[in-house]
Amino acid sequence: MTALLEVRDLRVRYGHVEAVRGLSFSVGAGEMVALIGPNGAGKSSTLNAIAGLVRPASGSVKLQGRELVGAPAHATMAAGIVLVPEGRAILGRMSVEENLVMGAEARPWPAGREEAQAAVEQQFARFPSLQRRRHALAGALSGGEQQMLAIARGLLARPVILLLDEPSMGLAPQLVQQIFQMIADIHRAGTTILLVEQNARMALKTAQNAFVLERGEIALHGPAPQLAADPRVQAAYLGGDVEAR
Amino acid sequence: MGQQALNGVFVGSIYALFAVGYTLVFGVLDILNLAHQAVFMLAAFAALLLVADAHLPLWAAMPLAVLFAGLLGILLERLAFRPLRGRADSNISGLISSLAMGTVFEAIALQIFGPDTSRFPHGTFPDRLIRIGGASASLLQLCIIAISVVLMALLTLLLARTRLGRQIRAVAESPRAARILGVNVDRVIAAAFFISSSLGGAAGVLFALAFNSISPDVGRSVELKGLAVIILGGMGSIPGAVIAGFALGLIEVFTVAGFGSSYRDAVSFAVLFVVLLARPRGLLGQAAAREA
Ligand SMILES: Nc1ncnc2c1ncn2[C@@H]1O[C@H](COP(=O)(O)OP(=O)(O)O)[C@@H](O)[C@H]1O
Ligand SMILES: [Mg+2]
């Protein structure tokens, strides 16, 4: 498998805090890779650096062979790196529809406006609960609906790779199931995904390959089923209360 | 009564036009652009130069002066705001650097045009009175009202319906969310400055035509009123600034008619004070503070 996204020796610093320390990994085209690890391990910092929201101290981020490290977020978006961030970043003062339209406007569509509009309608067909609240302010949606809106909006940007940061955070167990089902569907339809999760159990069930991040470094990596069976992972991440870690 | 109302709408349309540009930049950056009044003044002088010295007709001079004002806005953003972006104190330092740029603009105008009042040549605008019911208005006044209303309507459409409008609103709500959506935030801020300063410049040209007088300190007379209007309307709210601009124009005119001109500003600011007691965020202010 050729690497679609290649991250080499990535370092992210906030003042004296070194959040990511020389991280290297790659994601193949069509693959779903999970990045798991405890709170504060540097997962969000990694995604934010890849998406150009924070400028890494050093390292390389290549998408389809093209160096993007240090590029601003609008340039990484143009290249096809689409982030659905922790906390979702919904525009609460805009309508649900406008949020989706902004997603569709993030990158040009081959066949132009009509195609973009049709794609927005497609997302509405996929998420009837969003369709019903199409003209409502996005800030008035429930947490689960906001997460669906954030993912639908991300898909409308036609990601070359979709970065999902804790999509299940703060959701009721039933919704968590639904969100992971959705992510599996999106992957099956051909989207390459880098998934960050604290819900290691679900993430390892859904992804093909996985990395365990601890204190900014990769502690373990391998095929997801293999990691799920690893006694160290079971003890640390699958042994009950994941949230407590 | 009808005559006063007409005069109030006339003055109010200029205040509103000045204020929508002022509040647009505040909405996007959370910073007051204190050079807005100087752009207003320089655009008026630009129109005067084009009419009096270049002998252009007003219908050609005005759009050029407005374009000039928009470009001044981009310059302002580059010099007074962008270098400070990301600093923890960017709100107060931006305020001060824009105040400085405004002072520089005024000094330049003083150098070129002198401190005295300049006037448009006679016949720049046809002198015609039009009767509407019991009131009469000059053609100029009616054109000023019409141009202001059309420009504000265009701004509202731009913000509501276009891609740039959505991007401006996204940056105003959350620069981080906008960046995540691939918005080039610096470029959108520059565009907002261009639009804001164009509108401020248009207000300046109309104001100069209305009173046929331009001086380097002409912006001072609208500066405080513009501030009152955007506070009254709710900081960052375009419809709020429109409503408050017309309201202030009407209040002023009726105050002058009822109590004499010395009470004009006192009553206006008393109204502002009372409104803020009842609604601390202004008429249409956003309830939620924005994210960093
Ligand atoms: N903007 C920031 N400024 C300073 N420190 C930060 C910032 N963001 C994250 N950190 C620190 O970097 C480390 C990694 O954080 P983060 O990447 O959010 O971890 P995770 O997503 O795995 O929970 C933590 O110690 C956190 O406190
Ligand atoms: Mg995180």
Image (cartoon, coloured by chain):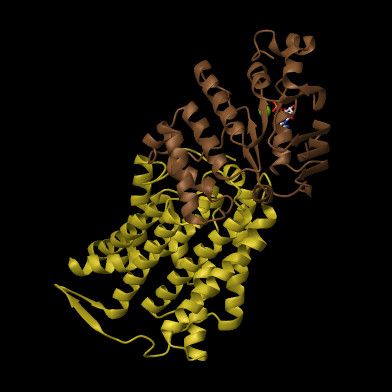
Ligand 2, by image quadrant, is top right
Horizontal side of A32 relative to B237 (left or right) equals right
The chain assigned the colour brown in the figure is A
Task: Write the residue at 43% across / 43% down.
Answer: A121
Place of residue A23 in the rendered image (x, y in percent of width and height, measured from the top left) = 82, 32
Place of residue B255 in the rendered image (x, y in percent of width and height, measured from the top left) = 27, 61
Q: Residue A36: tell me if it is visible.
A: yes
Task: Write the residue at 36% across / 85% down.
Answer: B125
Place of residue A66 in the rendered image (x, y in percent of width and height, measured from the top left) = 77, 49
Place of residue B211 in the rendered image (x, y in percent of width and height, measured from the top left) = 38, 77
Image quadrant occupied by the C terminus of chain B: top right
User: Would you place residue B124 above or below residue B172 in this image?
Assistant: below
Horizontal side of B249 relative to A123 (left or right) equals left
Q: Which of B39 and A221 is in front in this view?
A: A221
Q: Residue B287: tell me if it is visible.
A: no
User: Would you place residue B86 above or below residue B154 in this image?
Assistant: above
User: Would you place residue B207 above or below residue A198 in this image?
Assistant: below
Horizontal side of A241 relative to B266 (left or right) equals right
Q: How many marks?
A: 0
Q: Which of B193 and B10 is in front in this view?
A: B193
Q: Which of A8 and B183 is in front in this view?
A: A8
**Chain B rendered in what hue?**
yellow
Task: Write the residue at 60% across / 60% down.
Answer: B98
Residue found at the far left of this picture: B134
The image quadrant that residue B153 belongs to is bottom left
